[in-house]
Image: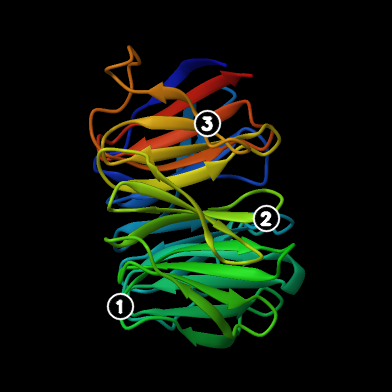
């Protein structure tokens, strides 16, 4: 496995909290404690434009496959909706009064899930942008969402150290997974949906069987919080990013550590907490954003 940093994009004036690849190849969107959501080209490694201004910090951006839409979750609880075809903001999704931490798309149901600090997840129809349902998940913050279409499950990572599994069909709770000793910051199902990986402020990765919901493996993965988990779209690997300023690449079939991207290992990587990572659609590029205000693009050869 070869890794090379191909770009370091500057322009943000404050920490960057989130990143998403566009439905259109070669485009990424980033946002954070800044005045807007920013569009970049990964083909030219260049700034394109500020998509739209925001009134508060943005903790989540999401581009649902098959829809010409970009969603941005704000600290004030609003979700902004940008229509690429109309090139304008639509009416915001207003329901939560506290910060939005994650947004995910349920393709089969054409629904959007929005996780909030208020402890609930709101369910929105992408047909008419109406609120369909509200899931009261926890007495505290819901930080992250992961979806397994194959196993008809949705997982919510919570500030109370739990991972809560719900039925994707009717949003009834199936199980509460206990094991982490600090808040759960990141979740991702394997591409086949057969297991779930959770990452926590306790610096641990935990692997859960989707069928039995039992703990398969615990990995002492980082020195500090595991902020983001991203599975490669085609190769048997997944990446984790941490407050310890490193990115690690793990085998998704053997859970072995294959690569550490850190300054200690000779990489000119981020100097502060890495808050989010995302693979491009073809898997050749991994993008990372950090409290250091930088966007970095990493090229991988497997």
From this viewpoint, is residue 90 visible? no
Is residue 282 or residue 144 the one in the foreground?
A: 144
User: Residue 93's mark?
Assistant: none
Mark 1 or mark 3: name the one nearer the start of the chain.
1
Quadrant (top left, top right, bottom left, bottom right) of the C terminus? top right
Residue 140 is labelled as: 1
Q: Is residue 213 visible?
A: yes
- Tell me where residue 232 appears, x and y as whole percent: 62, 37
Q: Nearer the viewer, residue 243 or 182?
A: 182
Image coordinates of residue 93 in percent, x first then y, are 49, 76
Q: Quadrant of residue 170?
A: bottom right
**Alpha carbon of mark 1 to alpha carbon of mark 3: how far?**
32 Å
- Classify residue 78 by image quadrant: bottom left
> In which quarter of the view is residue 144 placed?
bottom left
Residue at the spot 47% in from the left edge and 69% down from the top edge = 156
What residue would you read off at disc 3? 286
Label 2 belongs to which residue? 194
Q: Secondary structure at mark 3?
A: strand
Asked which colour scheme the image uses, the reply is rainbow
Residue at image position (27%, 41%) is: 243
Q: Residues within 10 Å of mark 1 (few under 14, many from 20)?
A: some
Image position, residue 169 (x, y; %):
70, 80
209 to 41, vertically: above or below = below
Q: Within 10 Å of the Cα at label 3, are there few (<14), some (14-19), or many (20+) other Cα atoms? A: many
Q: Are marks 3 and 2 in contact (CB under 8 Å)?
A: no
The residue mark sitting in front, 1 or 2, is 2
Residue 13 position within the rendered picture, expressed as x and y whole percent measured from the top left? 25, 39
* Label 2, residues with CA under 10 Å away: few <14, some 14-19, many ≥20: some
């Amino acid at each position: 496995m070869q890794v090379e940093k191909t770009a370091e994009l500057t322009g943000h004036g404050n920490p960057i909290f989130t990143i998403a690849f566009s439905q259109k190849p070669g485009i990424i969107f980033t946002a954070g404690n800044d005045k807007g959501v920013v569009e970049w080209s990964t083909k030219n490694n260049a700034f394109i434009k500020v998509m739209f201004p925001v009134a508060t910090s943005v903790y989540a951006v999401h581009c649902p496959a098959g829809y010409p839409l970009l969603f941005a979750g704000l600290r004030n609880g609003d979700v902004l909706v940008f229509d690429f075809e109309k090139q304008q903001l639509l009416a915001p999704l207003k329901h939560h009064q506290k910060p939005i931490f994650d947004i995910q798309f349920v393709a089969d149901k054409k629904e959007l899930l929005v996780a909030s600090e208020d402890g609930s997840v709101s369910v929105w129809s992408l047909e008419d942008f109406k609120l369909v349902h509200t899931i009261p998940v926890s007495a505290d913050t819901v930080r992250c969402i992961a979806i397994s279409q194959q196993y008809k499950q949705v997982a919510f990572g919570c500030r109370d150290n739990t991972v809560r599994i719900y039925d994707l069909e009717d949003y009834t709770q199936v199980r509460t997974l206990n094991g982490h000793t600090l808040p759960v910051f990141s979740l991702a199902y394997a591409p086949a949906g057969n297991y779930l990986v959770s990452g926590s402020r306790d610096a641990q990765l935990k692997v859960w069987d989707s069928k039995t919901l039992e703990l398969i493996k615990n990995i002492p993965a980082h020195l500090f919080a595991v902020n983001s988990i991203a599975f490669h779209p085609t190769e048997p690997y997944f990446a984790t990013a941490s407050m310890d300023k490193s990115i690690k690449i793990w085998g998704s079939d053997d859970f072995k550590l294959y690569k550490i991207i850190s300054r200690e290992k000779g990489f000119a990587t981020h100097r502060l907490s890495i808050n989010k990572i995302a693979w491009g659609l073809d898997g050749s590029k991994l993008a990372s954003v950090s409290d250091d205000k930088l966007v970095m693009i990493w090229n991988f050869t497997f």
